[in-house]
Image (cartoon, rainbow, N blue to C red):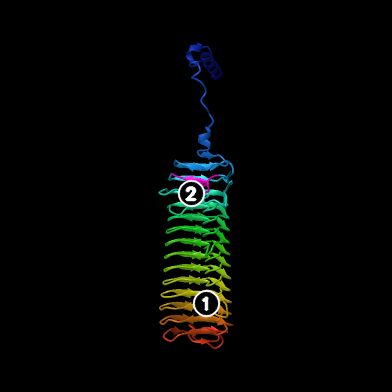
């Protein structure tokens, strides 16, 4: 009985007229719609062709080079790329922006009043003036640039700038220069060639971190007030290794063979965990209200170079190691605290401290009983 009932149901549906199952219209709805994105949707940027013509950027937006730009035969003041609009990003796309060292133009020039400009990924070389000139412009970002052999500064930016992963080499002026509230990170400034050509220079409230400043014709790194310099290598510069204003922190830096001082700052400084070797004048110098701790100062010029020099008051000099200098620690001012240091092989005195300072007892590690003792060994 169940089999007969199932067959009946099947025959009922099978024998229904075809009109009981509407098929819809067979007329096509229209031409097929595109399924691919347009080129503007894939690459939402404006190309800049390579060649020998100067490039003006007149509108906000994102731009990229499609070839090398080489400008040699135009007027002496011509820039490679001139940015006349704010809110612009230029990707050099790995290409070369080359000029003539006999001209007075810049590789990239940012016009007055323009801000928020990013330049990245390429080489700027052989311009008579700056490689990148945004010195009067705020919010300039330079990233992954090689700026080489330019007649002015390598990279010059105004306030609130970022210079990231850049190399500035063999420029006449400052290698990398930025003003207040700026960051220079993981960058190199090497072999400036002009008189007093600083490697890296920043204004106040700035950060310099993870950088190399080597063989520059002036100071290695110069910072304004309320700045931090950390984890930098500063070697073989003609002037000071690191030169700073007031309220400066220097942490974890390695300095060697600089032509005058290793680290010299003003009041309210914190210098810690640094290694200063072979400075021509003094290793570390502070004035007032500063802390110098856990640093090694070695082989300062024995004819006239002291390890740590204190010229003011209310400083704390603690847990440093001073070897092969003229004087290990030389304190000229009064009311300073000198504790837990170690010194050896200094040609004049390990500790030359004027009266009026609080100095932990000086002795050997074997005989000293005070936890605040300064050790001579």
**Magenta segment: does it hold 204?**
no
Of residues 200 and 324, which is closer to you in this image? 200
Name the spot of residue 18 as percent of width and height, x first: 51, 12
Q: Quadrant of the N terminus?
A: top right
Q: Is residue 189 above or below residue 360?
A: above
Q: Would you identify the image quadrant in which residue 71 lies?
A: top right
Q: Helix, strand or loop at disc 2? A: strand
Of residues 295 and 135, which is closer to you in this image? 135
Q: Would you identify the image quadrant in which residue 135 lies?
A: bottom left
Q: Is residue 196 above or below residue 358?
A: above
Residue at which label 1 appears: 320
Q: Which mark is residue 109?
A: 2
The residue shown at (50%, 84%) is 352
Q: Are marks 1 and 2 in contact (CB under 8 Å)?
A: no
- Residue most extreme to the front: 75
Q: Which residues are magenta?
A: 74-84
């Amino acid at each position: 009985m169940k089999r007969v009932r199932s067959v009946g149901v099947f025959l009922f549906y099978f024998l229904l007229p075809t009109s009981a199952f509407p098929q819809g219209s067979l007329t096509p709805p229209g031409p097929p719609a595109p399924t691919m994105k347009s080129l503007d949707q894939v690459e939402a940027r404006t190309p800049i062709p390579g060649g020998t013509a100067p490039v003006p950027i007149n509108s906000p937006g994102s731009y990229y080079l499609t070839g090398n730009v080489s400008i040699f035969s135009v007027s002496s003041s011509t820039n490679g790329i001139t940015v006349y609009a704010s809110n612009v990003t230029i990707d050099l796309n790995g290409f070369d922006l080359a000029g003539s060292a006999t001209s007075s133009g810049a590789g990239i020039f940012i016009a007055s009043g323009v801000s928020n400009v990013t330049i990245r990924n390429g080489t700027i070389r052989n311009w008579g003036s700056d490689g990148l000139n945004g010195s009067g412009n705020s919010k300039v970002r330079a990233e992954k640039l090689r700026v080489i052999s330019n007649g002015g500064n390598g990279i010059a930016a105004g306030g609130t700038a970022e210079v990231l992963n850049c190399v500035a080499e063999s420029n006449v002026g400052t290698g990398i220069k930025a003003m207040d509230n700026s960051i220079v990170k993981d960058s190199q400034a090497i072999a400036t060639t002009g008189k007093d050509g600083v490697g890296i220079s920043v204004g106040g409230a700035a950060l310099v971190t993870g950088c190399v400043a080597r063989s520059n014709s002036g100071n290695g790194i110069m910072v304004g007030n309320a700045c931090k310099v950390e984890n930098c290598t500063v070697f073989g510069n003609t002037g000071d290794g690191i030169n700073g204003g007031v309220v400066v922190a220097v942490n974890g830096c390695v300095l060697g063979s600089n032509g005058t001082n290793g680290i010299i700052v003003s009041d309210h400084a914190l210098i810690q965990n640094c290694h200063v070797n072979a400075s021509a004048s003094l290793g570390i110098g502070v004035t007032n209200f500063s802390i110098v701790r856990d640093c090694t100062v070695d082989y300062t010029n024995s004819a006239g170079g002291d390890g740590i020099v204190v010229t003011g008051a209310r400083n704390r000099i603690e847990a440093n190691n001073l070897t092969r200098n003229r004087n290990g620690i030389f304190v000229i001012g009064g009311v300073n605290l000198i504790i837990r240091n170690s010194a050896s092989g200094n040609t004049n005195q390990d500790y030359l401290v004027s009266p009026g300072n609080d100095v932990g007892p000086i002795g050997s590690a074997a005989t000293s009983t005070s936890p605040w003792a300064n050790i001579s060994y």
